[in-house]
């Protein structure tokens, strides 16, 4: 293994839980709007939302946690929600 092989290796992508924890701890907050929601065959609730950062529109989705499912009206279509996003990668976001 040469010196350059060390730099070529790709890092493993963080798990969904690690990504969520990082964003909830270090992410910046912006306001977004729920576009739609659906329940999958396995019972997971997915919320689709959009938000704008520095004039750029982003659209994403997130699986609701058990705590978020306790307040379904907060994640109903048309609702304003807080979004946590990575300041280095604005497309990386979760519902707060």
Image: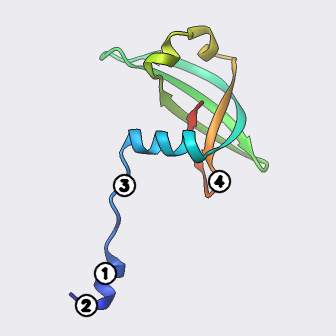
Relative to residue 53, is residue 83 drawn left or right?
Answer: left
Dot 2 and dot 1 residues touching (CB under 8 Å): yes
Task: Classify residue 65 by image quadrant.
Answer: top left
**Label 2 Cα neighbours within 10 Å, binned few <14 / some 14-19 / many ≥20:** few
Residue at 61 percent of width and 58 percent of height:
88
Going from N to C along the chain, the mark reached first, 1 or 3, is 1
SS under mark 1: helix
Going from N to C along the chain, the mark reached first, 3 or 2, is 2
Q: Quadrant of the N terminus?
A: bottom left
Residue at 65 percent of width and 53 percent of height:
87
Task: Classify residue 58 by image quadrant.
Answer: top right
Residue at 56 percent of width and 39 percent of height:
24
- Residue topped by disc 3: 13
Relative to residue 31, is residue 37 drawn left or right?
Answer: left
- Residue topped by disc 4: 87
In the image, residue 47 sits, relative to residue 12, either above or below, namely above
- Residue topped by disc 2: 2
- Image x and y of residue 84, in percent: 62, 39
Q: CA distance from mark 4 to mark 2?
A: 34 Å
Dot 3 and dot 2 residues touching (CB under 8 Å): no
In the image, residue 87 sits, relative to residue 57, either above or below, namely below
- Residue topped by disc 1: 6
């Amino acid at each position: 293994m040469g010196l350059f092989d060390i730099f070529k290796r790709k890092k493993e992508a963080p798990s969904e839980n690690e990504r969520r924890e990082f964003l909830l701890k270090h992410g910046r907050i912006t306001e977004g709007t729920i576009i739609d929601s659906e329940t999958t065959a396995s019972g997971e609730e997915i919320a689709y939302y959009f938000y704008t950062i520095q004039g750029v529109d982003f659209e994403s989705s997130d699986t609701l946690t058990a705590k978020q499912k306790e307040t379904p009206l907060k994640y109903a279509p048309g609702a304003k929600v807080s979004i946590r996003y990575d300041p280095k990668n604005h497309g990386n976001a979760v519902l707060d």
